[in-house]
């Protein structure tokens, strides 16, 4: 077996210092360019703070962040509400899913998209879609950018709903304020007064109630 010997480290010049040219070359290799910031750029996105309503920039990959305006802690993960869930107040910039078979009342949900695949009642404020995928009776305030009620779903809104857009293929009962439009697809039924500049009732859809083209403040 050959004997193992380490190579001695030989400094090429007697002083132990690198020659000037070599030193400059190494400094250049390990330095940042003058034009570039020494702080690495983190990919970020703009979100609306759910506490103060201001637009703030957060790292894309973060699970939580702080609002730069009000310093509120902003949760960014998606949340699933299972049957028997104890935590009924949810604040997140992510999505909330109420799982099928859940029956949850007195929810307080602020999120991006919300999917009611089970039954959930309470207050909802969604910056994105609120999609109601099973029969539901919501006793509380409902605000969403888009409220979607698919075919076969019977939705009762005891306090009505405020949204930009309502798209119904199933049945909705309640007072609707829609800042942009209401679309009733073929077979859809809407029972209740409707405040929207654009009410589109496709053939075979039914609206029972008054239509006001002016949206109340
Ligand atoms: Zn804020």
Image (cartoon, grey):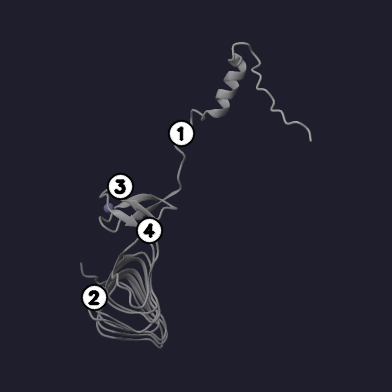
Residues under labels 2 and 1: Cα distance? 50 Å
Give the residue pinned by disc 2: 140
For disc 2, the neighbor class at 10 Å (few under 14, some 14 to 19, many from 20) is some
Residue 70 x/y as whole percent: 25, 50
Residues under labels 2 and 3: Cα distance? 31 Å
Give the residue pinned by disc 1: 38
Question: Going from the N terminus, do you reach mark 4 or mark 2 first?
Answer: 4
Question: Going from the N terminus, do you reach mark 4 or mark 1 first?
Answer: 1
Residue 86 x/y as whole percent: 30, 72
Give the residue pinned by disc 3: 68
Whether residue 173 is situated above or below residue 57 in the rendered picture: below
Give the residue pinned by disc 4: 76
Residues under labels 4 and 2: Cα distance? 24 Å
**Would you say residue 179 is visible in this rendering?**
no
User: In the image as oriented, which residue stretches furthest toward the right?
Assistant: 1
Task: Say whether mark 3 is within 8 Å of ligand 1.
Answer: yes
Question: Going from the N terminus, do you reach mark 4 or mark 3 first?
Answer: 3
Residues under labels 4 and 3: Cα distance? 15 Å
């Amino acid at each position: 077996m050959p004997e193992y010997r380490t190579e001695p480290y030989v400094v090429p010049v007697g002083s132990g210092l690198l020659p000037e040219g070599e030193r400059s070359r190494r400094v250049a290799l390990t330095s940042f360019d003058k034009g570039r910031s020494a702080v690495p750029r983190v990919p970020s996105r703009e979100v609306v703070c759910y506490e103060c309503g201001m637009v703030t920039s957060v790292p894309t990959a973060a699970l939580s962040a702080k609002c730069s305006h009000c310093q509120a802690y902003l949760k960014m993960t998606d949340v699933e509400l299972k049957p028997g869930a104890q935590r009924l107040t949810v604040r997140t910039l992510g999505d909330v899913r109420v799982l099928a078979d859940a029956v949850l009342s007195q929810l307080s949900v602020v999120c991006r998209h919300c999917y009611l695949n089970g039954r959930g009642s309470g207050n909802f404020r969604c910056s994105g879609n609120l999609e109601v995928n099973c029969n539901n009776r919501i006793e509380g305030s409902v605000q969403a950018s888009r409220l979607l009620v698919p075919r076969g779903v019977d939705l009762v809104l005891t306090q009505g709903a405020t949204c930009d857009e309502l798209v119904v293929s199933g049945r909705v009962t309640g007072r609707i304020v829609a800042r942009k439009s209401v679309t009733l697809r073929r077979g859809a039924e809407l029972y209740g007064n409707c405040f929207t500049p654009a009410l589109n009732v496709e053939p075979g859809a039914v609206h029972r109630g008054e239509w006001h083209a002016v949206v109340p403040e």
